[in-house]
Amino acid sequence: MPPRTVDICEVLSLDMVEPNVFLGASPKDSWQPIFGGQLIGQSIVAACRTVEGRIPHSLHAYFIRPGDAEIPITYKVETIRDGKNHSIRRVAATQANRTIFSTDISFHRGDSGFFDHQQAMADVLPPEKLTTEELSDDPVITEIPENIRRWYQPDQPVVLPDRIIEARPVEIRRFAGHKIEDGRIHYWIKPATNLPDDAALHICALALASDWALLDAVLTRYGPSLFDEGTQSASLDHAMWFHRPFRADEWLLYAMDSPSAQGSRGFTRGLIYRRDGTLVASVAQEGLLRVNR
């Protein structure tokens, strides 16, 4: 039996406690500690509930303490600015009166401009070609761990974390220990369930998914993956920019790389594309990484 998927709309649903204060929860049987993307997505939802006529275009966040998935999360929204074109909100997520996450989110009313360019999307296999059936002639499919191999079974999709996100890695050989010298990897991602036609909600959903496996780009030069036993990781901060319209419930290509790693910290970047090659978002993150020797 495939695992029960979780409706991402339920995860992003918050209760208003009082003006500018909202309460969120983690899905039943969630990972511990709380998945960082959940905190990002729910924080944007809280901020959006205090802004009218504008949608988020950027966020800058810090993961301060591990969150407990068994405890509700309180989101307090502070108005930093409401200008002619921009609004800025600061959101603090707390549990037991301790701040676990903080983010500043900027909103823009939209405008036209002269400049319009983007970096081209890499030519990679589409998600339909990344299935056990399509990859059956490649002997490496038998070398990768079973928990990774299940990602390529469309009839029994494994959605992570907490059964919210569906992912298909493009560079399958790296899960058999192959190194990627330039450190560039790609994932096709989308929520496990569909979303209504609400642009702000699609932004919140993509922000939630954007924390998925980004630190894996640090390890790809060395052989192990983020999902190997003995690998420990934790996100420290997260920044994201939204460029163009998209639907988060359609396959999006997440192109990742890591320009620098030193000691136990790794810096990563991500570009997120629609299938037609349109760049819709950019991400940057630094995290802690340790591999048991």
Image (spheres, rainbow, N blue to C red):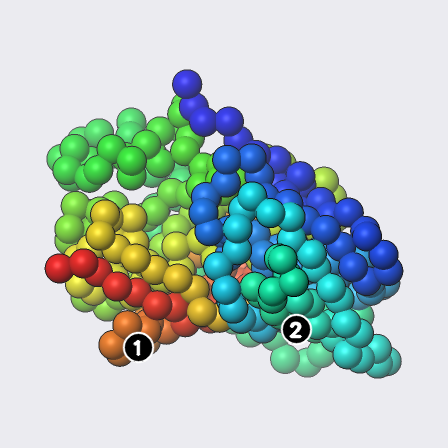
Q: Is residue 265 above or below residue 164?
A: below
Name the amino acid type tagged 1.
Answer: Ser
Give the quadrant of residue 158: top left
Give the percent coordinates (x, y) of residue 21.
Answer: 78, 59
Give the percent coordinates (x, y) of residue 29.
Answer: 50, 35
Left or right of 135 on screen, residue 178: left
Quadrant placement of the C terminus: bottom left
Determine the CA span between mark 1 and mark 2.
25 Å
Sequence-first tag of 1 and 2: 2
Mark 2 Cα-neighbour bin, 10 Å: few <14, some 14–19, many ≥20: many
Name the amino acid type tagged 2.
Answer: Asp
Q: Is residue 4 visible?
A: yes
Name the residue that disc number 2 marks. 104
Q: Residue at x 66, y 67 (%)?
A: 92
Mark 1 Cα-neighbour bin, 10 Å: few <14, some 14–19, many ≥20: few
Q: Is residue 37 above or below residue 165?
A: below
Quadrant placement of the N terminus: top left
Give the percent coordinates (x, y) of residue 118.
Answer: 52, 71
Q: Which mark is residue 286?
A: none
Q: Is residue 247 visible?
A: no
Q: Is residue 108 above or below residue 53?
A: below
SS label for mark 1: strand
Q: Residue at x 65, y 53 (%)?
A: 73
Give the quadrant of residue 105: bottom right
Name the residue that disc number 1 marks. 260
